[in-house]
Amino acid sequence: MLIMNTEDDAQLALAAARAGAAVVRDMYGESLERFAKSDGDFATGADLAAEKAILGILRTARPHDAVTGEESGHSGADGAERRWLVDPLCGTLNYAVHTMLASVNVALRVGPHITVSAAADPFSGEVFWTDGKRARLRRDDVDEELAPSAASRLVDVNLDPPFPNAPDFRAALLLAAPGFTDHFRPRVVSTTLAVAWVAAGRRAAYVTDGDLRDSVHFAAGIALCEAAGCVVTGIHGQPLHTGAGGLIAAADQRTHTTLLEMVRNQVAASPTATG
């Protein structure tokens, strides 16, 4: 097995994410062709161009690694020990309608673990990144440690389908759960930039449904939260990528416990639970 230096991998992820973000930023505001995908989803020319820039950097530096790109799909052996997960433009719909809420995500899975990741904000110039040990924010080529905090009380909830845990759990109902607004203030961003914001202390938590294993959308943000010391589990409190899936990423244990109790109350009240 080819052994790589984790710090080198982290710097490569950071460089690749920044290259993709530069493309996304430069193409912002253009009239972009849309390329239809499944279930009403689409990519733009910016998605394709950013992914090309990212893959060019990764394949030059790591020609033997496997890659999964949001737009180009899988390359390399299915069981590859090292696989890069690339989302060149998370928040395509926001971007297409000139809303500056998007991120460029690059992560590396080695075996079962995400070892490094970077999530770049094309418009602020910020890059949230981790070498698997510490989580940092790079701004103007200066790094600072990420510090989770629940002080904002802001909780982002992803309302995008699919909803594999329905009817037991629906993210939209969490916002109407008794006591939610006693503890939190809701936000709906639907971009994995929000997961990075939990690691950075800008959000108290992020909640989503879905199977997130090897997800190009979520791998980078989850790795950031874990490295920053957030409480990160599946939707029912189980270890990630086991059982029913989903994600609760919380700045601290108290926030996680409160949200998990609301989820459990929803499951208890669902038709399948009551028979």
Image: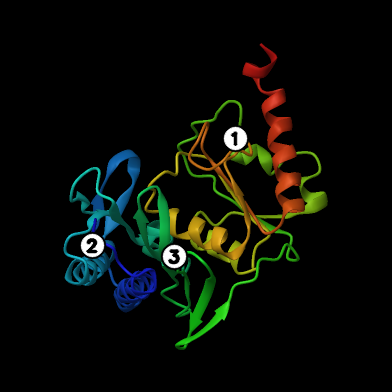
In the picture, residue 197 is in which quadrant?
bottom right
Q: Is mark 2 on a helix, strand or loop?
A: helix
Q: Which amino acid, by three-letter code, is at mark 3?
A: Ala
Q: How many marks?
A: 3
Left or right of 219 in this view: 178: right
Q: Which amino acid, by three-letter code, is at mark 2?
A: Leu
Residue at x 42%, y 68% (from the top left corner): 118
The mark that comes first in sequence, 1 or 2, is 2
Quarter the C terminus occupies: top right
Q: Which amino acid, by three-letter code, is at mark 1?
A: Arg
What crowding class fits label 1: few (fewer than 14 Cα within 10 Å), some (14-19), or many (20 or more)?
Answer: many
In the picture, residue 205 is in which quadrant?
bottom right
Residue at x 83%, y 50% (from the top left corner): 182
As displayed, is residue 51 above or below residue 15?
above
The mark that comes first in sequence, 2 or 3, is 2
- The residue indicated by pointer 1 is 170
- Give the numbered dot on residue 102: 3
Task: Provide residue 262's location: percent of width, then percent of height.
Answer: 73, 38
Residue at x 19%, y 46% (from the top left corner): 77
What crowding class fits label 3: few (fewer than 14 Cα within 10 Å), some (14-19), or many (20 or more)?
Answer: many
- The residue indicated by pointer 2 is 48
Q: What element carries label 1?
A: loop
